[in-house]
Image (cartoon, helix red, strand yellow):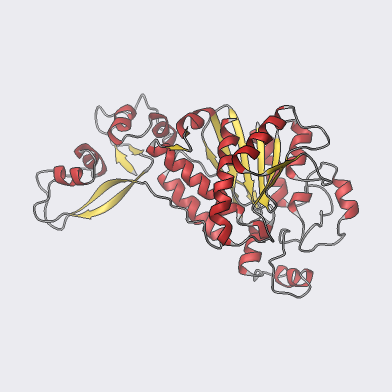
Amino acid sequence: MDIYVRRGDSFWYFSNLFNIPLQLIIDSNRDLDPNALTVGRTVKIPGYAAVDYRIRAGDTLWQIARSRNIQVDALLLANRNINPKGLYIGQMIKVPTRITWRIVQGKKNYDYSSLMNDLRRLESVYPFMRVPSIGNSVLGKRIPEALVGDGNKKVHYNGAFHANEWITTPVLMTFLNDYLLALTNQTSIRGLSMLNLYNQTALSIVPMVNPDGVDLVLNGPPEEEPWNERVIEWNKGSMDFSGWKANIRGVDLNDQFPAEWEKEKARNPSQPGPRDYVGEKPLSEPEAIAMAELTRKRDFSRVLAFHTQGEVIYWGFENLEPPESDAMVNEFARVSGYQPVKTIESYAGYKDWFIQDWRRPGFTVELGFGINPLPLSQFDEIYEEALGIFLAGLYL
């Protein structure tokens, strides 16, 4: 919600008036100097929306403010040049309304357009969150990253490396929404203060690494050639893409990283297809390149890649993982009920590469249990299990 600065106003005053933590207001207005606010400048207040209200007979600003549990001055700030003594029937004003509900409704077929629409809405209500692009998919879709906080502990979560594991995206987005809600409403999640975590961490989320693949699974082949014809051919003529894990070029993005990539290449398919083709070389695909560049740029303290299915957490690679990974995975297991598994005969994955090159904790979390794509009937249970891991990833 936008308000206008008057003489004598300050971020500290806005924080008290709207009951929003000061740091969130500062971080929502990175282009403004908190110590030199200019009269007439627009300030973003996170966690609020300006809702239209039509004046009725007998209305006063005091009555309207009291009925909405806000201060009269909040109404004055949201309505520039309003005359409190000159209200007239039919006049439209803006009423600051605290957002106390989820914007993200994740329990649905959650494709790329759903993701982008929800990110736009979240960014509008919570402008302390930034949504840069990390790169583009094969078909030119922007791959967004959600950034929350500037703390020293740099934590990264990602989802939908694999197309038919798309349910990881709305699970991540639901957590992102709940985290933002708790920050602006100063509520806890499972007894934990979110503002403390915000001040300590910089959370990076790439909710959908493989947007072309997700749209293929959920919406069918793209209209663009040659991709329309190719993906049907690679799928053996079937229009059922529920078994498709790869990107639109038939490359498995989680077999794309330079961590014993040759071992994965030797035993996997040699041609593009729905799953397990490693590509012509490591980091040949734009989605994998984008993730690698992001990881180098951000210098993460730890990474968690969310997949489905199996209710297990993989946490080792070639005995290169640091000692703290053991304690961390045991906490993830405690809060989720998932089984820690140190290693399996698998290579070239994102967390493998992260452990190998950074010697820091990296995890692959397999959400839910069953056959991919997991049914939406599991969504609520999966979210409750994953929530403990999302939180532990921040507080450990």
Residue drawn at x 14%, y 45% is 63
Seen from the viewer's position, the closer of residues 134 and 357 is 357
**Quarter containing the N terminus:** top left
Left or right of 41, for residue 219? right
Left or right of 163, for residue 96? left
Residue 146 position within the rendered picture, expressed as x and y whole percent measured from the top left:
55, 43
Seen from the viewer's position, the closer of residues 19 and 87 is 19
Residue 158 position within the rendered picture, expressed as x and y whole percent measured from the top left:
63, 46
Residue 286 position within the rendered picture, expressed as x and y whole percent measured from the top left:
71, 51
How many numbered marks appear?
0
Which residue is farthest right?
Answer: 266
Seen from the viewer's position, the closer of residues 143 and 170 is 170
Residue 37 position within the rendered picture, expressed as x and y whole percent measured from the top left:
33, 29
Question: Relative to 232, is 135 above or below?
Answer: above
**Quarter containing the C terminus:** top right
Left or right of 215, for residue 292? right
- The image quadrant of residue 363 is top right
Left or right of 312, for residue 6? left
Residue 139 seen: no
Question: Relative to 148, is 274 above or below?
Answer: below
Residue 198 seen: yes
Residue drawn at x 24%, y 40% is 70
Which residue is farthest top?
Answer: 35
